[in-house]
Amino acid sequence: MVFFRHGILALAAILFFVALPAMADNAKQSCASDIRFEGVSSISINSLGWLAIPKSISAAEGSVVFWPFDTESQPVQAEWSALAIVLANSGDIGANSVGGIIWVKKTKISGVKIDLISRPAASVTFSFDKDNTNCREGVKFELTNSSEVKFGGRTVGKIN
C-alpha cells in the first residue's frame, strides 16, 4: 500500500514535469494568435488618410517603417483591428519593398507595445499583455542581413 501511494506520487510528478513544457508552448502560441500579418502590395487612398505619424528604423541592410492607423479610424475585419502598416525596404532606387498590415484582435489592441530596434537587424517588435495575465509574447517584423523580411520568424518576402 505504501509503495502504491509513493508510486502514484512519483508518476504524477513525472507527468507534471513532462506536461509543463507543452503547457508553456501553448501559452506562447495563444499570445501570438492575437496578432497577424497580411501582406499587401498596394494601399487605398482612404487607408492612407487613416494613418497617423510614421516611425522608422534603419540598419545596414535597409529600413523598417511602422505607420500606425489613427486609433479613431482603424480598419476592422470581424474580430480584428488594423494596428499599422509595416514596410521593409533597402532604400535603393528600383528595389522592391515588402509590407503589409498588422492586425490585432479588437480586445487586445489597446495594450499593444511597440519597440523599434536597429541591431542586429532593422525590426519592429509588437508585444502585449494578453488578458492581463502577464503573458507577453514579442512578435517581430524584421529585415534580416540576407534581405529576407520575416514576421514572427516566418519569411513573408525578400527585398530585391
Image (spheres, helix red, strand yellow):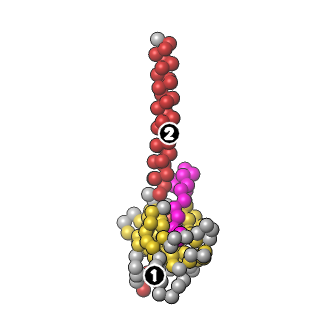
Q: Which residues are magenta?
A: 129-144
Residue that mark 1 sits on: 96
Residue at the far left in the pictured view: 78
Between residues 110 and 144, which one lies in front from this camera angle? Answer: 144
The secondary structure type at the circle numbered 2 is helix
Is residue 69 in view from this perspective? no
Q: Is residue 98 above or below residue 127?
A: below
Residue 63 magenta-highlighted: no
Looking at the rendered image, the disc whose residue lies closer to the viewer, 2 or 1, is 1
Total tally of numbered discs in the picture: 2
Between residues 15 and 97, which one lies in front from this camera angle? Answer: 97
Residue 137 magenta-highlighted: yes
Image location (x, y in percent) of residue 5 = 48, 17
Q: Amino acid at mark 2?
A: Leu
The crowding category of the residue bearing disc 1, from other C-alpha atoms within 10 Å (few below 14, some 14 to 19, many at least 20), is some
Residue at the far top in the pictured view: 1
Image location (x, y in percent) of residue 115 = 60, 67
Q: What residue is drawn where x is 41% and y is 72%?
A: 39
Q: What residue is drawn where x is 45% and y is 48%?
A: 26
Image location (x, y in percent) of residue 24 = 50, 45
- Residue 115 lies left or right of residue 106; in this view the side is right
Q: Is residue 40 above or below residue 138?
A: below
Q: What residue is drawn where x is 53% and y is 85%?
A: 92
Which is more N-terminal, label 1 or label 2? 2
- Residue 57 lies left or right of residue 150; in this view the side is right
Q: What residue is drawn where x is 50% and y is 42%?
A: 21
Task: Find residue 59 and report its image quarter.
Answer: bottom right
The secondary structure type at the circle numbered 1 is loop
Determine the CA span between mark 2 and mark 1: 44 Å
Residue that mark 2 sits on: 20
Task: Find residue 118 and report its image quarter.
Answer: bottom right
